Image (cartoon, grey):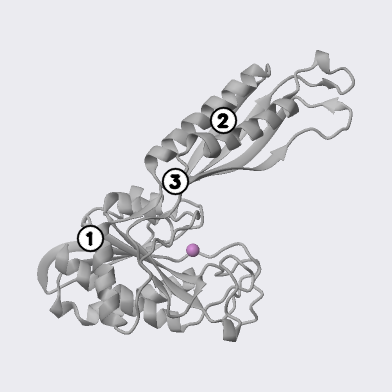
Amino acid sequence: TGIAKTGVIGLIEGAKPGPVIMLRFDIDALPIQEETGAEYASQNPGLMHACGHDGHAAIGLTVAKLLHARREEFGGTIKLVFQPAEEGMGGAQTMVKEGAMESPAPLRSLGLHIWNGKPLGWIGIAAGPVMAGASSFKITVRGKGGHGAIPHLSIDPVLASAQIISALQSIVSRNVDAQKAAVVTVASIHSGDAFNVIPAQVEMLGTIRFFEMEVGEMVHRRFNEIVHGIAAAMQCQAEIEISEITPPVINDAATTENVLRAARIVFPAESPDTSPYVTMGSEDFAFFQQKAPGTYFFVGSNNESRGLNFGHHHPKFDFDEEVLVRGSALMAAAALEVLQSA
Ligand code: NI
């Protein structure tokens, strides 16, 4: 207990020796006032499980119970990782730093998300990139303030910023291969507060998203060149702060085959969706995957007829609890498949 503050790790040792694999379940909530009216709604004002990580915690505990009951039947060790602070707060990175992926070090990793974008019954299991790498940035453009009616005595950071924002959009349209994906978004801009004053500086916030590390590196390099180059051309100075949020989630081909096999055993009448179910959202499971290749998959959880189809991070978000049974069964079976082949 106490790993990355509230993280918990459990080990289940099989009867025979074998590889170590890790299963990750994120457990954190969001700063949103819950409006579901459910009998099990959050009792903490301004905080709710709007992404379904309470469901992940329940699935993790069920998987632990299932696998513990069958520990005489398998070889190897299951490492269950219950992770706090997935929502952009660096939980996975901190757990890795505090030794979550050491002694014993897992060979492979598995993670899942219950997914309200898809109905109960749908399962998404795909190899390759499934969630984007992400970073956030802050740009400060400094000029020289002055009277709005006498611009030649000022250096206008607002005009420079306008050109920087426009030129940043050329990275995706002109530097990224048209068959690959990236996003550059300037989401916030703040400067000045009077109609007749040229301000001294402008601050901008935004995010960069990508799937392939090479694309990500190129986008960040061009980002730097454009911001500094245009600021200099406009007689301003620019300062950039970039924080990495997560690398992309890239699913391992062999582990993905194991999960697909498990899905065919547990749900023989269904066919999982193997077309890459890709989202530009990010997920810090990627930090665990960097230490132990693995697969992150999605289990559909909405039920429109019961009104359980609000999206993740919505104040009315809620899911069909049948997904807890399906997710637990699939994760436990997938863990056994991975143990056998790792
Ligand atoms: Ni989530």
Q: Amino acid at mark 2?
A: Ile
Q: Which mark is residue 240?
A: 2
Q: What residue is at 55 percent from the left and 70 percent from the top?
A: 49
Disc 3 to disc 2, how far (Cα)?
28 Å
In the image, is the residue at mark 2 within 8 Å of ligand 1 by its beta carbon?
A: no
Residue 144 coordinates in the image, percent (x, y): 75, 19
Quadrant of the drawing holding the C terminus: bottom left
Q: Which residue is mark 3?
A: 179
Q: Is residue 11 visible?
A: no
Name the mark nearer the viewer: 2 or 1: 1
The residue sitting at 36% across, 51% down in the picture is 287
Task: Quickly name the residue at label 1.
Answer: 254
The x and y percentages for residue 147 are: 87, 21
Q: CA distance from mark 1 to mark 3?
A: 25 Å
**Cβ atoms under marks 2 and 1 closer than 8 Å:** no
Q: Amino acid at mark 1?
A: Ala
Location of residue 193 with respect to 260 vertically, above or below: above
- Residue placed farthest to the front in the image? 178
